Amino acid sequence: MSGKIGIGFLGFGFLGIMSTLYLGLMWAPSVAIDAFESPAAQRIFYWHVPSAWAAFIAFAILFIGSALWFFRRSPTGWRLHVAGAEAGLATGLMTVWSGTIWGSAEWGTPWDWSDVRLNTFGLLTLLALFLVLGRRSQPDGIETRDTFSTFGLFGFVLVPFTYIATRIWVIRHPGPVVATGSGGSLQSDMSLVLLIGAISFTIFIIGHILTSMHITKLEQRVELLQNKIDRSE
Amino acid sequence: MNMSDVLLAFESVEIRRGMGIVVSDFSLTISEGEVVVLRGENGCGKSTIIEAAARILPLEKGKVLHHQKVVIDSEGRRNTPTVPFGLTLQENGMVGSDTIAEHLSNMMSICKIKTNLAPVLKQYSLDHRVNDLISHLSGGQQRKVSVIAGLLPAMISKSARLILLDEPDAGLDDAAIHTLCEHITSLRLAGHSFLIATHDERILNCATRINDLKQDVEQTPPQGEVWQFPVVELTKSKNFIQNGFTYNFKTKSGFANNGIAGFLTLGILLSLVEPMELENLHGLKMGFALLPAFVAGLCGDPIVNLLRENRALDWWRANTAIPRAVVLPMIGGAILTIISSYIFLENIEAIVVIVGSLSTLFCSLIIGFLQLTTNKLSRPQAVFIRLLTPILILPWSIVVTELTTYI
């Protein structure tokens, strides 16, 4: 049942993301010609910001799952950890990839190793990649789960650090345009597209996490049945 | 039984391996002069118990005590035993680039006692090989060295010592097993205690108790001569930095692991640019001067890599602190920075050399720490821990910028 709900969320989320992409590229108003070095490239913002928002949700899920496993040995916690890592990797890569395209157009370089926001977010994505690849390289077991959930817990330290990075050190990455505490600086049409994007990515990430948890549960059931067969032989 | 005589105690211990509980509600006490042999089919948990007693495996429930002091418990406490103990793992736990003498002297250093081991080595037909590298020995000879290292704390101490042997007979010839049985008996009669996992009937006969992980059965062990305590002298134990320096200096693993990467980086930089072309690009020149030392550090701690052989890391971790490379990475980083400073900056500033040296040290320590955190995994080499290393680029680039401004 949870598998079907997850796929339903994924489908709705996907449609919403495609709509956001269309609205962002074709419908949303352009920024002022002198607002950026490369004003046309700014449209990638409608993909970049919602995917970063979804990535933070995924990393929060990863943290909650890691904590539930580490402190309570909860099997649901482990499934949340796995789902959070996979979703974090997917949305993290979407954010980094769209950011590098914008960076190339706006700054003339896809990446800046001295920018705190870029590097901490990049590390979060690499942490998710480490957790996804690492889990596949190891047999499932308490040691594996304890080790990876520890990394999940420590990794979350980077989330608030990444969040405040552009508020404290504006090096390359622009400062916040939403949730600034001063009412924001966006036109209403821009805000609308951004809101549709944020909702769509949220629905998509919920679907991703439900589906991933369902798959992990099935994997664990297969392993249990295999062990039962091994013992009966 | 007098509690002060208890050398090892398991109190309601539960241990997991993989997803399954291998040992549940296990309790056992071993007093002075007892030999307890764990017997059972493969996978029943014999090695798990030995490794828990050696503090290698974490406990789900209960605690383990050495000489009435908690050494590991389910709350996460992991205390270094105040009294040294002997350990022979199923894998030998030795580094191939040590000689027999060096490996045994490591054990003696942990015990803070040294003695002439030639008579013992002769009994195991190893006296002619004492200065040979462990990697040059046959499998059976390596096993003998591992068993002698396990027995050593008892052999050189008048006070009762705990010895943990996991399948010590594996790979030994009949003569060596006979000698081992004689040693177990004579050391038992001298008051030392043993916990042994084995299937070998000859070693089973040496037991005062046989435990199948459910119940103990007492038996009468053979009699023999009491162990003749050798002439010993006290020595100082080495700390993890001294042990790391010895390994690094002897094996040149720091050069092989980190130094070559640093020199290759320098070569690549020189193939890309003419240093004279960088005349006014001060930031770039500083970055180039510090890059080889930084890359050398990114290769991690060479000693951690070296000790992954044959579970040597677990052996060291059970007995004392894991050796770490500290001194030579600093020297290596300084040498690399002196060379690259001379090439790219055309002069050698002390502050740049110090920063280069420290960057190699900190990077190798941080990456070594990350490697150690994944050592509990079944396949630590297969995990993608280096994916996390790019985080070091940000502080390094900040240091380069600051140093450029400063100079």
Image: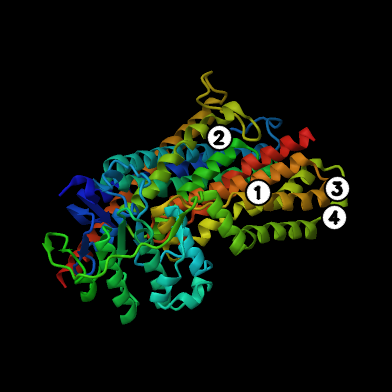
The residue nearer to you, when weighing B327 against B29, is B29
Residue in the picture at 22% in, 51% down = B14
Circle number at residue B274? 4
SS category of the residue bearing label 4: loop
Q: Left of B359 or right of it: where is B124? A: left
Q: Amino acid at mark 1?
A: Met
Q: CA distance from mark 3 to mark 2?
A: 55 Å
Q: Residue furthest top?
A: A182
Q: Are marks 4 and 1 on the same chain?
A: yes
Rendered position, B314 above or below A67: below
How many numbered discs, if any?
A: 4
- Mark 4 crowdedness (10 Å alpha carbons): few <14, some 14-19, many ≥20: few
Q: Position of residue B318 (x, y in %)?
A: 38, 54
Circle number at residue A28? 2
Identify the residue position indicated by label 1 in the image. Answer: B330
Of badges 3 and 2, nearer the viewer stands 3
Residue in the picture at 48% in, 69% down = B100
SS category of the residue bearing label 1: helix
The residue nearer to you, when weighing A163 against B376, is B376
Disc 3 chain ID: B
Residue in the picture at 33% in, 80% down = B175
